[in-house]
């Protein structure tokens, strides 16, 4: 993680490419164009780029209006502002009105780093998951990011994407294909299932699986890039197979990945579950390594939870 | 304002600038531009106008200050450290994991901070709440708020503008740091504020326009604002983003800029030389 192309560059390049073949694509920023890395979209398609200034709620409302006359707006800000500040406008003008707005929240969770607690959203995914019918996803590498942006553009309806700005990762092969709402089994396993979402946690989950393997523990790893609608079928399949889950999210454990998996398990196939993520706390300032440890968003903590749940399983 | 007072304020401002550059340079990156454009405003408030007591930060009848553009926190931390709210050594803990000095002003973590900010657009409303509360309690104090020009894009700023004049809050004195820049460029290009004076006048405020780096001008405006009987005051300060740091001043990239400690030291040396 970190050495690859910045995820924001993939965001920008993919939208430029999409805009070339689809004139409905428009891009919106709220005084964070430089942060989201969309400067060359602006220079390539100046007439389809709108910097709305530091006014996220207005941006969401304007995006809805653009959508109502046939445009496909992608609108971005830092995750807390793309969610908390736009919530009612995005909810009513875009979602309730059955329009087609693609909201993008950048620097999700601890990747806000030194911007600190006011910028560190552990709740944006949960807020968004509460909006009826909204598709909520968080890509874990540059390949899936590009493919999922294309799927989101094709999809008729609102979406919310958590976008890591800086750094990237390559987990997939160039020709891998993705569907919104379909999780990907990165690694098969029979003892425990690690379900992860996003750049930070999918990488940590893979590392945890390696660690567990050394101890003879077979851990499956699922990239659950789409948290809503959640891939029920895949969860049930692995509930049957392993009967034990650890969810891994760079978010509050409330109302995002951990909650979504728990809901499916309880309703369809009860299994053991532990949720690695932020335990009902606010964010705080610091660099990524400090924050990972501070909130337990580490391979080591995932592995500890897996061991604990396997002990539980044996009892 | 007599010569001595003026010289003292200038010396203080230079010290605050140096501490701010040092603080951010020590960490290696930060909101240097918007921190340096408000140094004179902070200096005249904290060293001349505000009724405060660093030994008793929670004093009930004190004047209060809200840094609504919370990303300029380091400038305020320099002032608070200099005034003795906490040890100056803390300044080198800016943004380090576990610090009490986060990038954005935070009343939970930092002694002397009267309001948490960082999500732009919220500080003026909080100032109205404080002003109303003090009015209920018969506390004769002033509430000071600094907002950014880019921040003024936020709708909440104008909701606040309307309610402050509706409630005739003459105990509220706000400043706009009109440095003409936001992150993506000049305010004129990103979201034009057009006639900012006229907007605040239109919302029923007492509006004063000053050079935000001139102590006599700031002083006159604040004195006038304190005499206002039935309106809130907006002091629009023409400022320069990054003022006083040779590597940042007026440079569009200075919003949240990396620079190393050697650069910081060089900038501080030049500041001090400029004083001779
Ligand atoms: C609600 C919200 N949206 C976006 C941001 C990110 N942000 C931080 S500073 C800034 C620009 C602010 O411009 P201005 O108020 O002019 O600040 P200054 O020039 O004084 O630094 C932006 C967009 C934020 N902090 N809060
Ligand atoms: Mg500005």
Image (cartoon, coloured by chain):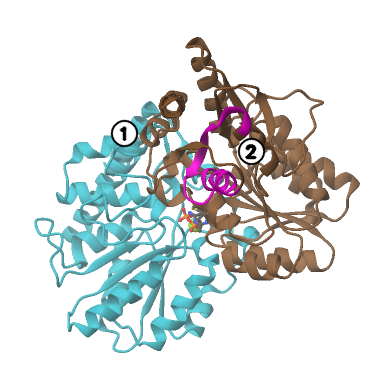
Magenta segment includes A264: yes
Provide the chain ID for the residue under circle 1: B
Residue A129: x %, y % from top left: 60, 55
Q: Is residue B30 visible?
A: no
Q: Nearer the viewer, mark 1 or mark 2?
A: 2
Question: Which chain is depicted brown?
Answer: A
Q: What numbered label is drawn on residue A235?
A: 2
- The chain coloured cyan is B
Residue A85 left/right relative to B85: right
- The numbered dot on residue B269 is 1
- Inter-mark Cα distance, 1 to 2: 62 Å
Residue A80 image point, x, y percent: 52, 53
Q: Is residue A258 visible?
A: yes
x, y (%) of residue B63? 21, 69
| Residue at left offset 44%, top offset 24% | A314
Which quarter of the picture shows residue A75? bottom right
Q: Nearer the viewer, residue B41 or B92?
A: B92
Element at badge 2?
Answer: helix
Find residue B147 and name its label.
Answer: none
What is the chain letter for disc 2? A
The answer to whether dots 1 and 2 both sit on one chain is no
Q: Is residue A209 magenta?
A: no
Q: Which residues are magenta?
A: A240-267
Residue sitting at x 74%, y 48%: A42
Where disc 1 sits, the SS reads helix
Circle 2 Cα neighbour tier, 10 Å, few/some/many (<14 / 14–19 / ≥20) = many
Disc 1 C-beta below 8 A from ligand 1 = no
């Amino acid at each position: 993680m970190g050495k690859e192309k910045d995820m924001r560059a993939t965001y920008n390049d993919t939208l430029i490419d999409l805009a070339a073949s689809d004139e409905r694509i428009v891009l919106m920023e709220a005084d964070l164009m430089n942060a989201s890395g969309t400067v060359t979209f602006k220079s390539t398609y100046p007439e389809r780029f709108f910097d709305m200034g530091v006014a996220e709620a207005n941006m969401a409302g304007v995006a809805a209006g653009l959508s109502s006359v046939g445009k496909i707006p992608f609108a971005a800000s830092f995750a807390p502002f793309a969610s908390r500040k736009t919530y009612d406008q995005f909810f009513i003008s875009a979602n309730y009105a059955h329009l087609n707005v693609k909201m993008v929240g950048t620097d999700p969770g601890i990747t806000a780093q030194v911007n600190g607690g006011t910028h560190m959203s552990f709740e944006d995914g949960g807020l968004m998951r509460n909006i009826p019918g909204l598709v909520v996803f968080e890509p874990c590498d540059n390949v899936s990011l590009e493919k999922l942006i294309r799927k989101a553009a094709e999809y008729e309806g609102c979406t919310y994407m958590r976008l890591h700005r800086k750094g990237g990762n390559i987990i997939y092969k160039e020709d891998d294909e993705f569907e919104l709402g379909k999780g990907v089994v990165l690694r098969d396993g029979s003892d425990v299932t690690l379900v992860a979402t996003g750049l930070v946690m999918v990488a940590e989950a893979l590392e945890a699986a390696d660690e567990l393997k050394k101890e003879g523990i077979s851990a499956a790893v699922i990239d659950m890039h789409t948290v809503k609608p959640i891939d029920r079928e895949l969860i049930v399949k692995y509930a049957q197979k392993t009967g034990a889950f650890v969810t891994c999210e760079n978010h509050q454990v409330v109302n995002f990945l951990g909650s979504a998996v728990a809901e499916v398990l309880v309703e369809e196939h009860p299994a053991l579950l532990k949720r690695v993520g932020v335990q009902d706390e606010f964010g705080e300032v610091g660099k990524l390594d400090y924050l990972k440890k501070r909130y337990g968003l580490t391979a080591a903590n995932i592995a500890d939870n897996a061991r604990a749940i396997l002990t539980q399983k044996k009892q | 304002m007599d010569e001595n007072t003026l010289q003292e304020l200038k010396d203080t401002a230079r010290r605050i600038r140096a501490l701010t550059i040092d603080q951010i340079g020590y960490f290696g990156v930060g909101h240097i531009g918007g921190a340096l454009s408000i140094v004179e405003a902070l200096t005249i408030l904290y060293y001349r106008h505000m009724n405060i007591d660093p030994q008793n930060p929670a004093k009930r009848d004190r004047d209060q200050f809200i840094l609504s553009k919370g990303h300029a926190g380091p400038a305020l931390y320099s002032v608070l450290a200099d005034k003795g709210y906490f040890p100056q050594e803390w300044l080198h803990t800016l943004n380090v994991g576990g610090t009490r000095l986060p990038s954005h002003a935070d009343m939970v973590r930092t002694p002397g901070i009267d309001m948490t900010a960082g999500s732009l657009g919220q500080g003026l409303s909080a100032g109205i709440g404080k002003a109303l509360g003090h009015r209920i309690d018969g506390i004769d104090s002033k509430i000071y708020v600094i907002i950014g020009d880019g921040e003024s894009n936020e709708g909440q700023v104008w909701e606040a503008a309307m309610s402050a004049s509706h409630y005739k809050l003459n105990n509220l004195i706000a400043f706009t740091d009109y440095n003409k820049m936001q992150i993506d460029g000049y305010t004129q290009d990103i979201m034009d504020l057009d006639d900012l004076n006229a907007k605040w006048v239109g919302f029923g405020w007492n509006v004063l326009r000053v050079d935000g780096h001139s102590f006599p001008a700031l002083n006159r405006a604040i004195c006038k604002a304190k005499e206002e009987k039935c309106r809130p005051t907006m002091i629009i300060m023409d400022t320069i983003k990054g003022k006083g740091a040779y590597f940042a001043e007026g440079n569009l990239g200075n919003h949240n800029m990396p620079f190393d400690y050697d650069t910081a030291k060089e900038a501080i040396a030049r500041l001090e030389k400029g004083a001779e």
